[in-house]
Image (cartoon, rainbow, N blue to C red):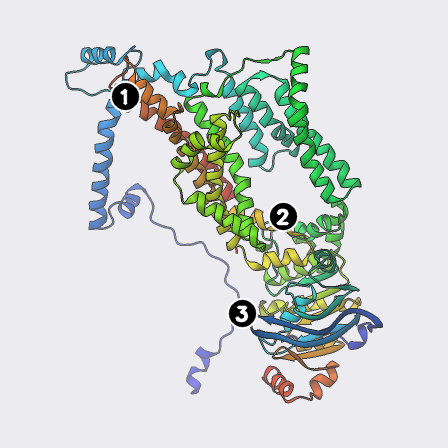
Amino acid sequence: MSDAAVPLGAVPPPVPGEVAVQITGMNKWYGQFHVLRDINLTVDRGERIVICGPSGSGKSTLIRCINRLEEHQTGQIIVDGTELTSNLRNVDKVRSEVGMVFQHFNLFPHLTVLENCTLAPIWVRKVPKREAEETAMDFLRKVRIPEQANKYPGQLSGGQQQRVAIARSLCMRPKIMLFDEPTSALDPEMIKEVLDTMIELAQEGMTMLCVTHEMGFAQAVANRVIFMDQGQIVEQNTPREFFNNPQSERTKLFLSQILGH
Amino acid sequence: MSDTHAQTVAQVRDTMLPPAPPPRRETGAIHWLRENLFSGWLNIVLTILAIWLVWTVLSGFVPWAWRGIWGAGSLTECRQIRDQLYPAGTSVACWSVISERWQQLIFGFYPPGGYWRPPVALAVFLVAVLPILFTDLPRRLLWLTVAAPFLIFFLLWGGTIWGPLTMALGVVLGGVVWLTGRRTGSPLVTLVATILVPLLFWMFLAKPLAAELAQLAPWGLPRVASKDFGGFTLSVVIGLSAICLSLPLGVLLALGRRSDMFFISKIAIAYIELIRGVPLIVWLFTAQLLLNYFLPRGTNFDLMLRVIIMATLFAAAYIAEVVRGGLAALPKGQYEAADALGLDYWQAMRLIVLPQALKISIPGIVNTFIGLFKDTTLVAFIGMYDPIGLATAIRASTDWQGIYWEIYVFIALVFFIFCFAMSRYSIWLERRLERSHR
């Protein structure tokens, strides 16, 4: 676990009242398996939420529902004022406003780093190529790998690939960023470089939902930590309260297991 | 642990080792021979066996081919020359049949005055596919690719130049409708209009227009009927047409088979399984005999066109299965990343999925193409004069009755050159695309 030593004060507060994501009474099943049960969650603009929990607790499924990589069956999900239904136009609209970073990066191996970053702006946002490339270089500088722009993803290290993936999402200028275990597939030496990038993003006021077990990151930038188990939100609180004064037995057990070594 | 181990357990390196070159290997031809050919008893036996095998084949074939007789007018003449030159009982090739009949084997019954046309058409084809095959060529060459089908049609079948030009005009019309509609109208209306306008133009306006223009300016080439196509011209026209048409159709079928939409996927599965489950020769007979029953009375649908359509439909089913393998081999994360970025289905397929899936499928696709090209020889059975059909005809002529090997060796050689070129290209392409590894 890396210690992201950024003082909490450096992170701007969320904007109360402006809702980025609103989930009410949402349920999801995989066949007979009830994977998400009665999820209610409101995320304000600029809020940074860390979601943790044991594997199979439905935390990845939850954030994948927010850009409809998974479909929910009942309840309501409203992202940036658009409700997610089977209406494909709404789905594409939400997806172009919501960035996602995956555990296994999912860069496009047949395109260069720069092409990875310009593809969606050019084809979805219809940005002219020159302009898209300039934006992409700005974000590649921001994640500190502009010199790799013309390489292919296969030539980069895991940490570099994940930073490219973050830059690729940012090039769409998303309003919300989803992180699905962004550091779980990385070597320990590379975790910090990715977390630093995410912390910088948080400091700029990006709305973020992160599934992660990096508790140092949670303490540094999260407004709220959500603990999930068996498809339900078991506990949510500010990081300080969550780590120092957990309420439920299940949370205490989980925290003792991930922090107790 | 006792103190005696302290020195060996704890260790600190204060200088890092520089990289050193690997040890030099034993080299030289004798070493190579011993290593590769005579490394053990089994290897020695196999080496000797292989040398004997190669010798047996070549010692028969090479003198036979090398001493071959050119320039005789018939098989009888060939035999007379052979008896004069060589002791009795020597077997030599009679290549005269090739030098006498090569034009027929290559051009079939194409009018001799137009022998330049098929090679020029082939050259146009090769130039037109260059910008597709070699992606670093200037993109402007793609205009040639668009114009090539009409030019090739004109070169091969002849007639006035206005026929192909009015056909091309239909395509241009469609393009204009598409471009104006995309800016102003709704997408659906635009799509329907883009398909309908050229169709109506071709059905009602193209022919009279071409006829009018032909009266004004009767430029053109002598018309050549499809039944006069033969030999390698026929094989190459059928083979390359089917290759070019079956790839897009096969890709669409593969996408259809994996589609979430019930009817689309079931139709694709039914099509693929039906076509693959029946031998090509049966489909060719269907094309020859049955297709006319289904078409309106009086339509005389060109047999060659029917064969091209059948070969295309047949190959598309195989291509679809090969491409489906490539699609399945692609990690799910690629689809998800494309979705998460907001790309729609066709964008995701065109920009992310197909470039990678087709790359994985290259060996299978080229394998199917090579198979398809060789399978064009089956048209001999429905009365078309491809090289095999012509070989039968030549062997039945009085001059060359009784000749076997020479014609078939020649046909095999030409087919081999075509297929080997395709194989080399696919290997080159695979290497070139081998820029990423998962």
Q: Secondary structure at mark 2?
A: helix
Q: Amino acid at mark 3?
A: Asp
Residues at marks 2 and 3, CA–CA distance in whole angstroms: 52 Å
Residue B435 in view of the camera: no
Marks 1,3: beta carbons within 8 A? no
- Residue nearer the viewer, B118 or B53: B118
Which amino acid type is shown beneath numbered disc 2? Leu
Q: Nearer the viewer, residue B370 or A118?
A: B370
In x, y percent, where is residue A211? 66, 72
State the residue at coordinates (56%, 52%): B263
In the picture of the structure, the residue carrying the numbered disc 2 is: B351
Q: Identify the residue position indicated by label 3 in the image.
A: B14
* Circle nearer the N terminus (2, 3): 3
SS category of the residue bearing label 1: helix
Q: Which residue is mark 1?
A: B66
Q: Position of residue B111 (x, y in %)?
A: 47, 13
Q: Do the residues indicated by labels 2 and 1 lie within the same chain of the protein?
A: yes
The disc placed on residue B267 is none
Q: Which image quadrant: the N terminus of chain A?
A: bottom right
